[in-house]
Amino acid sequence: MTRCQLLPWLKANHRHHTHYTHGPWYGPPYVMGWDILNLSPRAHWLVHGFAGGTLTMRRAVTRQNRVARLLPLTWLWRYPNPAQRLLHAIARVNWLLSKIG
């Protein structure tokens, strides 16, 4: 059973892209656990719905980026914003700790 990288006490059944700049069509392939996180539904909502400011999962990145265009410092609020980057970092640290522990 795969564990959630953000909330390790939960089962992971979602795949979450931390960014959209890599991949088979854009450059180097994604690294599972680093570029693509294994998340539980609750953790996935935390990243997109809560930290993204949309409070919904339906087209969350599109909504977040649409709102960001209306705000000053657009680059700061687009996906991934600082809160989402922090959650990605926590998930990556948990993943690295699971590999060495």
Image (cartoon, rainbow, N blue to C red):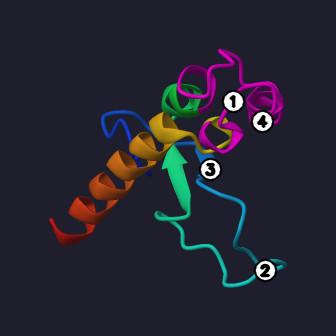
Residue sitting nearer the eye, 16 or 52: 52
Q: Which label's residue is closer to the chain start, 4 or 2?
A: 2
Amino acid at pointer 1 = Pro
- Determine the image quadrant of residue 93: bottom left
Counting other residues with Cα less than 10 Å from the Cα at mark 4, is it few (<14), some (14-19), or many (20 or more)?
Answer: some
User: Would you identify the image quadrant in which residue 13 lies?
Assistant: top right
Q: Position of residue 81 (x, y in %)?
A: 56, 40
Q: On the image, numbered disc 3 is attached to which residue? A: 15
**Is the residue 55 above or below the residue 92 in the image?**
above
Task: Give the SS element for disc 3.
Answer: strand
Q: Is residue 90 above or below residue 33?
A: above
Identify the residue under disc 2: 24
User: How far is mark 3 from mark 1, CA to CA?
Assistant: 31 Å
Q: CA distance from mark 3 to mark 4?
A: 20 Å
Q: Residue furthest top?
A: 55
Between 16 and 2, the one lying in front of the other is 16
Is tag 1's residue or tag 4's residue first in the polypeptide sequence?
4
> Is there a contact, CB below 8 Å, between mark 3 and mark 1?
no
Q: Give the image quarter of residue 78.
A: top right
Tag 3: residue type?
A: Arg
Disc 2 versus disc 1: nearer the observer:
1
Q: Which residue is mark 1?
A: 72
Query: How far is the residue under mark 1 from the one under mark 4?
Result: 13 Å
* Magenta segment: 48-76
Residue denoted by label 4: 65
